[in-house]
Image (cartoon, rainbow, N blue to C red):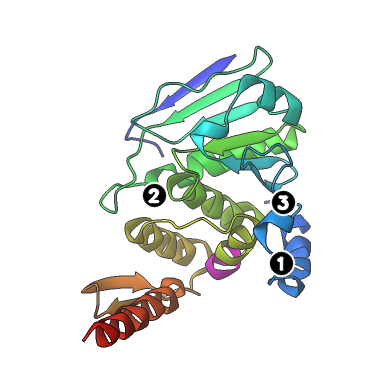
Amino acid sequence: MEFIDVEYVFNHRKENEVQDILCKSVANISTSSSESSSTVDLNLNITEVTSSLFLCSATSVHTSTLQLLGVTCVINATVELPDTPLPENTVKYCRIRVLDSPNQNIRQYFDISADLIHQISLRNGKTLIHCTAGVSRSATLCIAYLMKYHKLSLIESYNYLKLRRPIIKPNCGFFTQLIEYERELFSNNTVKLIYNEMLNLELPDVYDSEYKSLNYFRKKCKNSAD
């Protein structure tokens, strides 16, 4: 087994699989996550991002599950958790030590994680990436991979992954770095930062409607109480 411990330094083939799935998924956008075939039926909240990439929380990772899924590479994107339990046939283990904080530089890991996922895929292997909850850090790295190797824009990558795993929510600092990465890859942006008055900070526009709804209900509840 090869062990890769990524500290705080690091520095195409166009595939159509994700594009095809995205087009099909848009037609079924109202389908609930419990009915989606993208989540492996193991009651472990493991999401199949592509045929060679899985995303999950740390609590969903078990050696028997990895063997069942045929996983040959595991990426652990945490600082606070111990090393992932691995079956003997896992050939690569990558530890990316990053906190789920808007101030963390996760951008430095975009290429190293995306390249590794792609290399494993070319060898007919499968990668499982996890953080603590499978919501922010690991989701951010999956989105970077989709942009780099599946040539999806940031909004397409985010919407695609959101359809597959509705609970994803990269923190605002990570999303800002994804916006910068999209500009580097494609020389334009499909997601922009906008100021949210309620929170007094800039948010990616894909989050704005959620916070506007929250603010509306808060005001409504306050008015009812008055």
Element carrying mark 3: loop
Q: Is residue 188 visible?
A: yes
In the image: residue 204, left or right of residue 202 = right
Within-10-Å neighbours for mark 3: few <14, some 14–19, many 20+:
many
* Position in image of residue 208 (x %, y %): 40, 77
Quarter placement of the C terminus:
bottom left
Q: Measure the C-alpha gap from mark 2 to mark 1.
A: 32 Å
Left or right of residue 10: residue 182: right
Dominant SS type (magenta):
helix
Q: Is residue 102 left or right of residue 35?
A: left
Residue, disc 3: 38
Residues under numbered marks 3 and 2 in contact, where contact means CB atoms less than 8 Å apart? no
Query: Which of the two discs, 1 and 3, labels the residue nearer the N terminus?
Result: 1
Q: Which residues are magenta?
A: 153-157
Give the answer, above or below, for where 218 lies relative to 143: below
Look at the image and say whether residue 18 sits in the magenta stretch: no
Q: Are marks 1 and 3 in contact (CB under 8 Å)?
A: no
Residue 1 image offset from top left, x and y in percent: 60, 14
- Read off the residue under disc 2: 107
Residue on which disc 1 sits: 31
| Residue 179 circle label | none
The residue depicted at 59 percent of the width and 43 percent of the height is 55
Q: Which is more N-terminal, label 2 or label 3?
A: 3
Pick the residue in front: 106 or 166. Answer: 166
Task: Work out which residue is located at the far front of the displayed protein and give it.
Answer: 225
Query: Given the image, on which type of amino acid does mark 2 rest?
Result: Arg
Of labels 3 and 2, the one closer to you: 3
The percent coordinates of residue 179 (x first, y second) are: 42, 65
- Earlier residue among tags 2 and 1: 1
Amino acid at pointer 3 = Ser
- Front residue of 84/113: it is 84
